[in-house]
Image (cartoon, grey):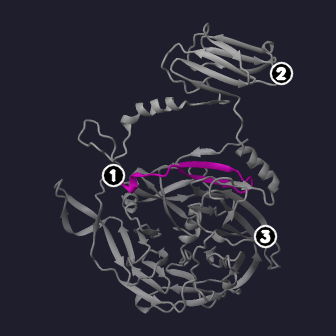
Amino acid sequence: MEVAANCSLRVKRPLLDPRFEGYKLSLEPLPCYQLELDAAVAEVKLRDDQYTLEHMHAFGMYNYLHGDSWYQDSVYYIDTLGRIMNLTVMLDTALGKPREVFRLPTDLTACDNRLCASVHFTSSTWVTLSDGTGRLYVIGTGERGNSASEKWEIMFNEELGNPFIIIHSISLLNVEEHSIAILLLRIEKEELDMKGSGFYVSLEWVTISNKNKDNKKYEIIKHDILRGKSVPHYAAIEPDGNGLMIVSYKSFTFVQVGQDLEENMDEDMSQKIKVEPLYYWQQTEDDLTVMIRLPEDSTKEDIQVQFLPDHINIVLKDHQFLEGKLYSSVDHESSTWIIKENNSLEISLIKKNEGLIWPELVVGDKQGELIRDSTQCAAIAERLMHLTSEELNPNPDKEKPPCNAQELEECDIFFEESSSLCRFDGSTLKTTHVVNLGSNQYLFSVVVDPKEMPCFCLRHDVDALLWQPHSSKQDDMWEHIATFNALGYVQASKRDKKFFACAPNYSYAALCECLRRVFIYRQPAPMSTVLYNRKEGRQVGQVAKQQVASLETNDPILGFQATNERLFVLTTKNLFLIKVNTEN
């Protein structure tokens, strides 16, 4: 059986700046342009039965503004009339109205359990689209940047069951056929789940193809399903279609399409039914008592118990019951056993080291269960009382004060479960590479090169590091390509942040809150004036600027996209453009 390779992310030290001094707030005004929408954005609010954190991550925090990475400064959204609207910016001072490029053929309001409509730009001429009701569209668009050749035409249209959103898609073209691989996400009710939220996350890898070039009909040729218990932060198909990468808190595994539910049920039940302990034991400071339920009609002659100073051997009816090394030494000459009236065997062991608490009876044996006495638990709690307190730092002036939780910041707190980055092989459907991300918190993803996989940004210490996956390089699959100094620490203080992004050329990173405010963090740049560090008395060559833009609206922010020159911010009724950079 092949075992997944445990890998690590290799940080490029030259891309780090240990002397970074922080961001300086700049009051330079940012040009901001506002466009009023003809129809409101087709926002779908969470229903009462979508109450879990996973529903909030996947659908409640959904980005309704879609950037076309194949064409710079081109964004799309879907309005309440079922229209896909596009805005392509050439000149900020001559903005036109968003134009309709496609209209969904179905009435979305007729579906009660629909999700938000989602779109992904597969290539420069292909688009994948979900209307939020469970129907998948694959659309040929022609060259989208050319009005003469752009024409959106449905090439595939099929109902795929429960509603889903599109996470990622790629186009694969060879001599014989053209195929498109799409990654869909669903959150579905799990009737068999005895604990937890009662929902599971389903990632579906669907491939459609037209094997006959003369025939334009596309059909599904592959359908694989992964299941997990958390919404992935990042999920993308490799450009060659041979693998899949996922960043998530909880692991995903492939399941067979149409797998027998009864088999799953039997497997789940067998895992969840607690196994009856083989024996029970309890202890005091002086001795231990082991209790074993005997088979019916057992006699004294059926039982053999051998005591040694650090070893025990129990045989019942000529069958080995328990044998192994004791945790610590006992007085084997004083140890005894007796058959009780309730058809149980009671063994008494006298400790040689009085006062020593045993964590286990037989070293490495997990078949028994320790029964704790209430008075014993109270004594242990009393011993540990000096390490705890109901008050936060009740006496800070004493010699060794306890930790004051008020001193901790949000950026110092990490989740109990650490994320992992996994690579799955497309043919074997097994995990080939695993990276334990530990405390490297996931921040956001960005498309730097549309022909490559999306990059993902992780927090490393206080910095935010951008990683580009390279599926073709098996030994060095993830490349550190850029660093946003101290951004990992800075973003942790923004409690109301909703969306996070950066420019494809790494010139700035930006985040927006749920309402109005947008924060921009620029890379260090040379100063036009002479600046000195007061503490060290040295001249400062570069300064990293922070800027804040406040939008003139009280509507919640529904979408957010960053390009090299501009930030696009979508609200229910308006689309805002913030001019961040001027390309030379």
Amino acid of disc 3 = Ile
User: Residue 305 versus residue 405: which sits nearer the camera?
Assistant: 305
Name the residue beneath numbered marker 2: 297
Q: Percent from the top left, x then y, of residue 301?
A: 80, 12
Asked whether the residues under the numbered discs 2 and 1 touch, taking CB atoms below 8 Å apart as contact, a structural biologist would say: no
Q: Nearer the viewer, mark 3 or mark 2?
A: 2
Name the residue tied to disc 1. Answer: 406
The answer to whether the residue labelled 1 contacts the one labelled 3, judged by CB atoms less than 8 Å apart, is: no
Q: Alpha carbon of mark 2 to alpha carbon of mark 1: how far?
A: 63 Å
Taking the image as shown, residue 467 lies to the left or right of residue 306, namely left
Category of crowding for the residue at label 1, using alpha-carbon neighbours closer than 10 angstroms: few (below 14), some (14–19), many (at least 20): few
Q: Is residue 67 left or right of residue 212?
A: left
Do we see residue 150 in this rendering? no
Q: What amino acid is labelled 1 in the image?
A: Gln
Q: Is residue 427 left or right of residue 57?
A: right
Direction front: furthest residue: 341
Label located before the other in sequence (1 or 3): 3
The residue tagged 3 is 220
Left or right: 553 in relation to 117: left
- Near mark 3 (Cα within 10 A), the count class, few <14, some 14-19 or many ≥20, is some
Does residue 500 show up magenta in the picture?
A: no
**Which residue is at 52% across, 61% downward?**
456
Expressed as whole percent of the image width and height from the top left, the position of residue 507 reads 40, 68
